[in-house]
């Protein structure tokens, strides 16, 4: 918006104008033809009056008296070149040097003066500041009139006291918000802005926050708080000042410097684990249900069974299996037919079937109808449970207790569709729900609902933007949450996670942001199980792998109908690099992580390296690494149950095609 027509002003201080009135005539300055003005007027003069002379003088501050174009608390811009005075339908101007001086002829009486200061001669150019006052002009005496000059905002500049912080180190950064006139001089002072300058962040991860949503005055103290999370790499601090240009500021989050690798001897033969920590469906969706429980207990660390009787999970535990959970969804209920207004159709899905006729257990739109979204002819519609309702929490408690009664050795539950922010929970639904007043209420409701399970839960949800923990970990950090599932990890039904929608970086950084919470971080691909796709997903998993908290999921059937991936027998150890953000592992156009020792099924194979090219359009050269790798890993198509293996083969690629990966062996 042009500064001349921008009506929002900054009111700073009172500037005294000497308006000296005396008998007799005479005028000064360059008089212009009369022009209508919005507020200029004159009252009824005394019967004996004639024109009075009014002398006007405005001192112009030197441009060198203020460092960095800052102005002292009286807003007359150092760029002022002329003054314009409008009154009683007239407009007169005078040019300025160190001051603006003019004498005008005014009829005595009540007169409104509209005064503008410009950066061009003759009242031209950009309007820098304005003032308006109404005064009684009396002949024969000195008239002192005060005018409030308002700086005309032409630009807003946002600046930060420091432009960089380091991941892992919380910081508080002062934010400087300044309004400038058209000449670039900063409008300062203690008086509040007539309209506060609204501030904004583009960070959806929750890693940063502002101490105030707007700048109320030039001196308003504002800080940008950073919690140390590695879930964000840069944050833009913007402003909105009614359409004028804004120069935003960017806070860059530098990756934490990884400590230098410590060379440790390779473990003795036979001491390496047989496989990384693994997760598999066992009975859920009929996956692997023909495999003996003893085999599953020897090759899988955690199984997930159906949410009814969980008999496969029970057999797994009785065979010596470590962790067994059963599927539940405490957020959404399937098998819900219309209508959605009371009396609503009877939901037959788990949890919801116990409260199908209790409206308090469901989320509604503003009209009172249950919010819903269509799935398919089998599942029909989904409806959303009101997580804060005692009726819904009791229904979840009853459902979980019923499963445990059938599978008493069960360790916990998968809590599908849990752990995401409120803003994403209504995706695809007919309308937003009205039961939740905001995030705080939603987090409290989710906390109570998950606790109703009575056993630890593995949440399947997170921040849809960063793909890491929602609400700075407020949900994953709950004592009853054992960890989080990354469903579709690096490979889902839509394809590999490449630079498409920045999926590779977001998934990797989201996963890395989960590890510091010291909970299970389950990477569970759900895409094509061809060897090339599985190799890409597993190599990407090796980039972010943590031996304590990382689990790898096997849930989609391979060519032989089972879902037990032989690549999980490849165990990387003694990493030469460990990242808090995936950018730390980028070398040229590919991402690389080397390990001093690797093994397959407990047998050492020597150093290995995972190399991933997430570009969807360009090949990537494998850079020079710490060792010469002359071999690589090739995966069999079939599952390990039917003899599938991860094989060390001769030859190592020098480059990678778009959307491909390699695991190199020395």
Image (cartoon, rainbow, N blue to C red):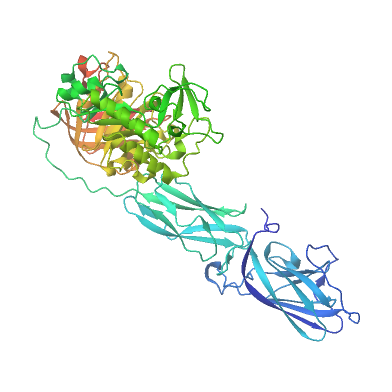
Q: Position of residue 469 (x, y in %)?
A: 35, 41
Quarter holding the C terminus is top left
Is residue 652 shown to the viewer in this render?
no
Q: Nearer the viewer, residue 446 or 357?
A: 357
Q: Nearer the viewer, residue 341 or 150?
A: 341
Q: Above or below — where is 599 with respect to 55?
A: above
Q: Nearer the viewer, residue 487 or 310?
A: 310
Question: Left or right: 457 with respect to 7?
Answer: left
Q: Residue at x 15, y 30 (%)?
A: 273
Write down the quadrant of residue 568 in the picture: top left
Question: Left or right: 186 with respect to 7?
Answer: left
Q: Position of residue 493 (x, y in %)?
A: 39, 23
Write down the quadrant of residue 297 in the picture: top left
Q: Residue at x 50, y 25 (%)?
A: 344
Question: Left or right: 97 with respect to 451?
Answer: right
Is residue 69 shown to the viewer in this render?
yes
């Amino acid at each position: 918006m042009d500064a001349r027509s921008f009506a929002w002003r900054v009111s700073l201080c009172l500037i005294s104008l000497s308006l000296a009135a005396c008998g007799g005539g005479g005028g000064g300055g360059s008089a212009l033809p009369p022009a209508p003005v919005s507020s200029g007027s004159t009252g009824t003069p005394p019967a004996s009056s004639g024109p009075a002379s009014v002398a006007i003088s405005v001192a112009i501050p030197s441009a060198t008296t203020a460092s960095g174009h800052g102005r002292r608390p009286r807003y007359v811009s150092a760029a002022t070149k002329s003054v314009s005075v409008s009154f009683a339908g007239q407009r007169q101007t005078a040019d300025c040097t160190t001051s603006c001086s003019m004498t005008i002829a005014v009829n005595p009486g009540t007169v409104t003066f509209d005064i503008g200061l410009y950066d061009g001669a003759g009242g031209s150019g950009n309007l820098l500041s304005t003032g308006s006052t109404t005064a009684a002009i009396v002949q024969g005496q000195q008239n002192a009139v005060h005018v409030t000059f308002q700086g005309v905002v032409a630009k807003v500049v946002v600046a930060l006291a420091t432009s960089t912080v380091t991941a892992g180190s919380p910081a508080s950064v002062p934010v400087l918000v300044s309004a400038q006139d058209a000449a670039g001089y900063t409008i300062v002072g203690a008086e509040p802005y007539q309209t506060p300058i609204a501030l904004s962040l583009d960070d959806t991860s929750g890693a940063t926050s502002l101490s105030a949503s707007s700048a109320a005055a030039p001196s308003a103290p504002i800080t940008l708080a950073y919690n140390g999370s590695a879930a964000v790499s840069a944050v833009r601090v913007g402003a909105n000042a009614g359409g004028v240009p804004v120069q935003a500021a960017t806070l860059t989050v530098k990756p934490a410097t990884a400590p230098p690798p410590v060379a440790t001897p390779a473990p003795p033969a036979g001491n390496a684990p047989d496989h990384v920590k693994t997760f598999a469906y066992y009975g859920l969706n009929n996956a692997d249900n023909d495999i003996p429980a003893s085999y599953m207990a020897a090759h899988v660390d955690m199984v997930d069974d159906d949410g009814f009787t969980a008999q496969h999970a029970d057999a797994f535990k009785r065979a010596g299996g470590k962790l067994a959970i059963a599927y539940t969804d405490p957020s959404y209920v399937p098998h819900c037919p219309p209508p959605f207004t009371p009396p609503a159709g009877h939901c037959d899905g788990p949890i919801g079937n116990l409260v199908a006729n209790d409206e308090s257990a469901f989320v509604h739109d503003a009209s009172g109808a249950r919010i819903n979204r269509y799935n398919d002819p089998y599942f029909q519609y989904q409806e959303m449970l009101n997580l804060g309702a005692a009726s819904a929490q009791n229904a979840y408690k009853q459902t979980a207790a019923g499963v445990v009664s059938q599978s008493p050795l069960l360790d916990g539950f998968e809590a599908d569709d849990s752990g995401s922010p409120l803003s994403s929970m209504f995706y695809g639904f007919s309308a937003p729900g009205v039961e939740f007043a905001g995030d705080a209420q939603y987090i409290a409701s989710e906390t109570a609902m998950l606790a109703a399970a009575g056993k630890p839960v593995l949440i399947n949800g997170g921040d849809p933007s960063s793909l890491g923990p929602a609400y700075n970990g407020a949900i994953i950090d709950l004592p009853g949450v054992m960890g989080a599932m990354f469903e579709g990890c690096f490979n889902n039904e839509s394809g590999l996670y490449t630079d498409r929608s920045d999926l590779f970086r977001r998934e990797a950084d989201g996963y890395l942001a989960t590890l510091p919470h010291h909970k299970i971080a389950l990477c569970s691909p759900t895409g094509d199980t061809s060897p090339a796709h599985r190799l890409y997903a597993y190599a990407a998993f090796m980039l972010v792998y943590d031996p304590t908290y990382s689990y790898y999921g096997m849930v989609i059937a391979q060519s032989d109908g089972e879902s037990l991936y032989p690549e999980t027998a490849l165990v990387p150890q003694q990493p030469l690099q460990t990242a808090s953000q995936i950018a730390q592992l980028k070398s040229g156009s590919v991402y690389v992580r080397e390990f001093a020792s690797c093994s397959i099924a407990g047998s050492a194979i020597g150093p290995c390296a995972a190399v991933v090219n997430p570009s969807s359009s360009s090949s990537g050269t494998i850079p020079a690494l710490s060792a010469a790798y002359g071999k690589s890993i090739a995966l069999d198509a079939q599952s390990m149950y039917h003899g599938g293996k991860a094989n060390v083969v001769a030859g190592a690629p020098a480059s990678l095609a778009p959307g491909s990966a390699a695991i190199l062996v020395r």
